[in-house]
Amino acid sequence: MPIVITPGREEFSTRIFTDNCCKREVLNLLVYCKNSPCCDGKIPLGRYQEHLTQCAFESVQCTNEGCQDKMPRKDLKGHLEKECKLRLEICAHCNKVMASINLTVHIGSDCPKYPVPCPNNCSVTSPRAELGDHLAVCPEAELQCPFSNYGCHVKVRRAQMKEHEEKFVRDHMLYVLNCNSKLEKQVLQLWQNLELKEQQIQQLSETVKRWERDCTQFLVGTNGHPLSSTQALSCYIDKALGLEEQVAQLVQLVRKEQNHFDLGTILEVAESTKQRLSHMETYRDLLENLDCQFKKHDVELNNHRTLLSCNEERFRLLEGTSFNGKLIWKITDYEKKKQEAIEGRVVSLFSQHFYTSHYGYRMGARVYLNGDGSGKGAYLSLYVVVMKGEYDSLLAWPFKQKVTLMMLDQSGRKNHITDVFRADPHSSSFKRPDNEMNIASGCPRFVSHVQLENPKNACYIKDDTLFIKVTVDLTDLEEL
Ligand SMILES: [Zn+2]
Ligand SMILES: [Zn+2]
Ligand SMILES: [Zn+2]
Ligand SMILES: [Zn+2]
Ligand SMILES: [Zn+2]
């Protein structure tokens, strides 16, 4: 307890002393805790603050950052373990650690391992992340009939698809038949269009030829070579000017010797010359007009040429496709194409595609005329390629048929070069194609250039053309 001593009024000053004895007594006085009656502690005043830092009933804030909850100190442990919405918990399905408050949402929509039932009610329950894989094979999933392109718009559960296909074979055939006859009609129509276009082109080219003739006749100069329109015109104008000069000279002469000449005739000549001159002027417009039309027809002619070659390409593809697992591939201009391969401009050629049956595997062949891999430079390499087809989902994979590659002998002695291999089911070349086509597989050393170009008792290149044959063995192949 501080004691204040006041000395005389004249010298007013304050001095403070600490009465340590008294202080000790006061600090030893017992006081009640502010949390009484819950806390029944009686504490010496000097240790009061220390007590509050330990008192079980003192209100404290949750130690988790972000949690504003307050509670008596004795309940903090329980709150942290069981109640705090920010306490960390482990997802029992995927072991991910997160705040308790987020766990329900995580399990309800995010947890990749949480088991969810198949939405098609097929009794399968699968981890959320793997549901997509299951749906791709779920027997209860509804699928479009593979003949939907042809008009069968029925949706069938996967498990019933085979039954549907068997039951509706006749209908499917009719759909396909219908489609086919439509296609045939279209092809016929195209042929007719093509003929019409050819006639038009013929007519146009005749018109152009006629005009060419007309123009050449009009523009032929004195030396017999065609002149440009301006050259021709200036030539005529020069001639006309010369004539005018002659006339003027004549008129002068006539004036001098009026009696000796018949002025009327000379005036007539002058008049006709003038007329011819103005006539020439009109040709300038005509020529420009002709020039313009000429260009227009040239453009049209080119358009028709492009269209024609486009149609030819389509017909070539339509005619060349086979559906019996056999490909006969005609390669023309061998020398030129081989040279292009040597120079690295076009190293490989790709055949028209073919099918093992109407709804079978879609395939093609690829040839490297100057070789590929171990055959590069001295061999012709020949490969087959499995291509993405419309019916792949109905076929057996991987492709494992026997394939025969042949270079056909054109001499009639049947000394064909043959190589047979069975598709290796472990090779990625024969899996179901993800892209337009798989990696080609076959014989990098199918035939050496020496054997191909100078064979004994055979002829593989005739008229610069060779024939390659690819046969797929169809035994054991289930017909769809
Ligand atoms: Zn207390
Ligand atoms: Zn809390
Ligand atoms: Zn989880
Ligand atoms: Zn399912
Ligand atoms: Zn169907």
Image (cartoon, rainbow, N blue to C red):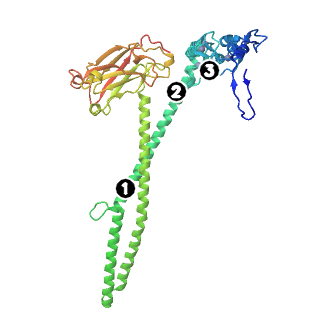
Q: Which numbered disc, 1 or 2, marks the residue that appears first in the sequence?
A: 2
Q: Which numbered disc, 3 or 1, marks the residue that appears first in the sequence?
A: 3
User: Which residue shows up at 31% across the image and 75% down it?
Assistant: 242
Q: Nearer the viewer, residue 17 or 457?
A: 17
Task: Respond yes or no on whether mark 1 lies under 8 Å from ligand 5.
Answer: no
Crowding at mark 3 (Cα within 10 Å: few <14, some 14-19, many 20+): few
> Looking at the picture, how far across and down is residue 74, in whole percent?
70, 10
Task: Respond yes or no on whether mark 2 lies under 8 Å from ligand 5.
Answer: no
Crowding at mark 2 (Cα within 10 Å: few <14, some 14-19, many 20+): few
Q: Which numbered disc, 2 or 3, marks the residue that appears first in the sequence?
A: 3
In the image, is 89 to the left or to the right of 276?
right
SS under mark 2:
helix
Splitting the image into four quadrants, where does ligand 4 fall?
Answer: top right
Discs 2, 3 touching: Cβ within 8 Å: no
Discs 3, 1 touching: Cβ within 8 Å: no
Crowding at mark 1 (Cα within 10 Å: few <14, some 14-19, many 20+): some
SS under mark 3:
loop
> Looking at the picture, how far across and down is residue 182, in whole percent?
54, 30
Task: Respond yes or no on whether mark 3 lies under 8 Å from ligand 5.
Answer: yes
Q: Which residue is mark 1?
A: 212
Q: Amino acid at mark 2?
A: Asn
Q: Nearer the viewer, residue 303 or 46?
A: 46
Q: Amino acid at mark 1?
A: Glu
Relative to residue 458, is residue 160 depicted above or below? Answer: above
Relative to residue 55, is residue 250 depicted above or below? Answer: below
Q: Say which quadrant the N terminus sits in.
A: top right
SS under mark 1:
helix
Residue 165 seen in the current view: no
Q: Which residue is mark 3?
A: 154
In the image, is 332 to the left or to the right of 97?
left
Q: Which residue is mark 2?
A: 180
Q: CA distance from mark 3 to mark 1?
A: 63 Å
